[in-house]
Image (cartoon, rainbow, N blue to C red):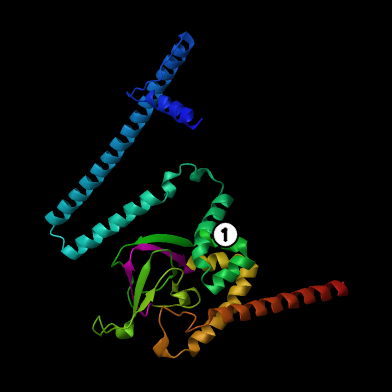
Amino acid sequence: ATYKYFTSLHWALTQFTPASMDVSAKNVYERMFSIAVLFFAMVAFSSIVGGVTASMTQLQNLRSNHMKQFWMLRRYLKQNQVNKELQFRIEKFLEYRIMKEQEYVQPNMVLHLPKLSQPLRNELAHSIMVQWLRGHPFFHKVSTLMPNFMHKLCSNAIKEKVLGQGDIVFEAGEECTHIYFLSAGLILEYTPLAHRSKKLEDAPSHRLQQKQWLSEPSLWVPWKHLGVCEAEKPGELISVDANSFCKEMSAHPAPRTFCASYARLYVECLNNLPKTVLSDVLDQHILDSTALVERASVLLAAIYENRAASNLDLTNVG
């Protein structure tokens, strides 16, 4: 039985190739079956070979065009006497962007996305962006308790931009209007203003990675950057615009009350910090956001209990 099976398989494979074997038709019906299989095999084999050939040709054309474009870029940079360091950064950044475009589907490639309703767009933006914001205790709490507010926030106040190696995110002394979150792959190096005068190798710095944040005070108080932030490795940076955040927050009673409670506690702790530790990177070790969120939640619950009691008293009086 095993020999017959492999003989049948061998015969079937010979119909797709120019090969031959000692098994052949013995009567008219077997001959007709062989001819029909041969025609089918010829069409199928030609289609497979044609498809593989077309795919390989397309890949070669894409690779050839990619190499040609990089050659044109190098020629352009060389003719304009661009320094070697900047040339290297430009090429590395473009390689990263092209790799990302090949590995991930970009929004502009999906033609049906603009056809979505606005509520669906808000939910989609929330689903994509909120994963990076949840690392912060405040935004995690808001996302859990007030999902509608977070949907609006992700749709209207949050932007994403791509950084290349060596790109400057902000300089010391600049007006701060955003809080920044790091997405996957991005690595930032933050050097406080007090240490910029030292030699580069001696200056202490903070190395920030995925789901960490910078410049949170800009949400609650007027703030100027206290250091320089530079991209050490390319990636995506998520930014929350402080003005848009305040606008969306003010339009909803519950978020407004919770944010006001948290802001008062945050600014109080900020004012109590020594000036030597103030920077754009105020992580959990310096300023415990988790504890502040819990205290703000307790205050919010107390406020709503008082309001409920007041409404009950008015109802009894009526």
Magenta stretch prevailing secondary structure: strand
At a point 52% along the width and 72% down the height, the residue shown is 136
Residue 191 lies in quadrant: bottom left
Q: Quarter of the image holding residue 226?
A: bottom left
- Residue 196 shown left or right of residue 215 in the figure: left
Residue 173 appears in the picture as rendered: no
Q: Which residue: 28% across, 36% down? A: 57
Please tell me how many numbered marks the rendered image carries: 1
Q: Which quarter of the rendered picture does the C terminus lie within?
A: bottom right
In the picture, measured across the screen, residue 146 lies left or right of residue 215, that is right
Residue matched to label 1: 151
Going by the numbered disc 1, the residue's amino acid type is His
Disc 1 secondary structure class: helix
Q: Position of residue 33 (x, y in %)?
A: 46, 15
Q: In which quarter of the image is residue 251?
A: bottom right
Examine the rendering and report whether any part of residue 305 can be seen.
yes
Q: Which contiguous range is marked in magenta? A: 225-242
Q: Could you say where residue 154 lies in the image, as x and y percent from the top left?
A: 52, 60
Image coords of residue 204 (percent x, y): 32, 83
Q: Looking at the picture, does residue 54 appear above or below residue 143?
A: above
User: 277 above or below 8?
Assistant: below
